[in-house]
Image (spheres, coloured by chain):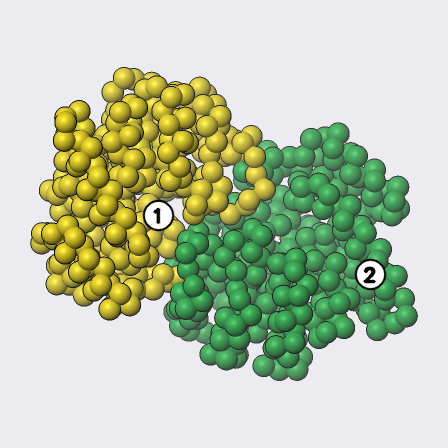
Chain colours: A green, B yellow
Amino acid sequence: MTGTHDFYGVIAPVLTPFGEDGNPDAARFLTHAKWLLEDGCTGLAPFGTTGEANSLGLEERMGLLDTLIDGGVDPKILMPGTGLCALSDTVTVSRHAVERGCGGVMVLPPFYYKAVNDDGLFAYYSEMIEQIGDDRLKIYLYHIPPVAQVGLSVELVGRLIKAYPDTVVGLKDSSGDWDNTKALLDAYSGFTIFPGSEIFLLDGMRNGGAGCITATGNVNARMIRNVYDNWETDQADALQEEITSLRMTVQARPMIPMLKAIVAHYRNDPGWTNVRPPFLPLDAAEAQAGIAELSEQYGFELKAA
Amino acid sequence: MTGTHDFYGVIAPVLTPFGEDGNPDAARFLTHAKWLLEDGCTGLAPFGTTGEANSLGLEERMGLLDTLIDGGVDPKILMPGTGLCALSDTVTVSRHAVERGCGGVMVLPPFYYKAVNDDGLFAYYSEMIEQIGDDRLKIYLYHIPPVAQVGLSVELVGRLIKAYPDTVVGLKDSSGDWDNTKALLDAYSGFTIFPGSEIFLLDGMRNGGAGCITATGNVNARMIRNVYDNWETDQADALQEEITSLRMTVQARPMIPMLKAIVAHYRNDPGWTNVRPPFLPLDAAEAQAGIAELSEQYGFELKAA
């Protein structure tokens, strides 16, 4: 472990746009990714939960990563999600990301089988690392028990760091449980830890965190980045309060369709509301109500990409 | 819907053997599948939960299906699991099964995202059916909320049957909740319903069920088949009691490693104990204790394939 972080700041799990035919829309995807970097993101985590990654097929996932890199996004700031249920698929997608030069990969535990223990999960990550067998592989563990159900205990994280100190270099904690994030920060100094929501950005920074990887970074990176940049100033608490409040307003509705509705509204691009089943677009009136709340309460707007 | 069932009787979700290198062992897989048919299975459901299907990659899954069919197993009695998280992957694997002539496919709901509703799941299956666009597609819904967490409500099943009566033809109910199975049987006469355990075999048959699809069919098909064949006789309850009791003994230990330990023991083939992470083999002493219990309590043995 090093004292610096390869990834830091505000990282958005990039939304994945779909065309009317239900296929991923590579052009809109690239445009949005580049806009996020202009809006304040310091890195991008395509194919996270917010990116509907687990509704994307293997080939679609690798193809969209190629789109970003071939389109000029620096692979060093990319941390694509590559954790699938099956070890062999995880190896395929992760190897592709490494070969394309990605700075890291974000790896869910295998999430179908529920009756698994730390030894089994350790074996999974261990096999993954051994099979890829590439020093360039940098793994960011993805802990999101509310969705994946299978989580990564503080102890397991420590075992993985100890066994693979140059490979298992960070973690995104989307548990929503600050006590868990704090326990990780306290236990593993130098390990790169991102809370999975800007709600914990300031608390994280004050305890050695690296920033945050957050769904709302897709629409509000600038304000979140402002907290990151000013976390040591007197304004920090007031700034944090505002982004927390805005986040709560967004997440009061189904997060992914709501974020897509915001992008569609401000870019005047209705195609952005498309989601892939099992998700459905937000009811139009509901989306408008959410957008109106954001505008009235925070003067929120999204600049055109 | 018709009054007859294309699939019926005792169907085993075939165990998937792995070699020392961690790859699926196609030769052992084919041998075991053929043995299951000799042992009393009326059909096979490769790539179910028991088959560690969600630890198999896309290519591995399709390759192993080819192994069975190219190896002489009649595709009409095959109901491979083809339900993955991503619609596009589900379409790829299902289309392959249809093109290989499989009698049906067993399809999990998309199981990563948890905040989904019946409309979203309906859209998922609907898109799958439309995209495959092949009259030969016969879907058996796979309801297993203890593992997948995402389940299929009785109402949703009815909507799917109504919308696609020639395609959505059956369901495996692995809820472990007889009330749910009974509600389905009562609601959808003629629909092919399999309890996901032989514990409910006799109850199912007495209420219009089609048989059972059961993990322990991998080691105990003969006795389970005997209940199926004699469900209308005076012996039925006594026979059911015995298979229920044996099942409870097997499932007192982690099911998949225990089943593999049984096969390994009786075939004198230690390689059969291999599992893929996140599973781990059963501790050898624990496995021996389970095997001894089965032998002592039921005179259980597994004939060599």
Crowd class of label 2 (few under 14; some 14 to 19; many from 20; radius 10 Å): many
For the residue pair A81 and B183, the one nearer the viewer reads as B183
- Residue situated furthest right in the rendering: A234
Q: Please, what secondary structure does the residue beneath circle 2 have?
A: helix
**What residue appears at the point 48 percent right and 28 percent down from the top-left corner?**
B156
Q: Chain of mark 2?
A: A
For the residue pair B108 and B255, the one nearer the viewer reads as B255
Q: Quadrant of residue A256?
A: top right
For the residue pair A302 and A52, the one nearer the viewer reads as A52
Instruction: Name the spot of residue B115 as percent of width and height, x first.
Output: 59, 42
Please determine if labels 1 and 2 lie on a single subunit. Answer: no
Question: Badge 2 is on which residue?
Answer: A240
Instruction: Name the spot of residue B134 as percent of width and height, x first.
Output: 36, 27
Of the residues shown, which amino acid type is indicated by label 2? Gln
Position above or below: B156 against B111? above
Position above or below: A211 against B171? below
Question: What is the distance, in whole Å, between disc 1 and disc 2 at their CAs?
Answer: 45 Å
Position above or below: B277 against A21? below
Of the residues shown, which amino acid type is indicated by label 1? Thr
Give left or right: position of A157 versus A223.
Answer: left
Give left or right: position of A289 versus A260.
Answer: right
Tags 1 and 2 touching, CB below 8 Å: no
Give left or right: position of A12 versus A103.
Answer: right
Question: Badge 1 is on which residue?
Answer: B49
Q: Please, what secondary structure does the residue beneath circle 1 have?
A: loop
Instruction: Name the spot of residue B113 as percent of width and height, x first.
Output: 54, 45
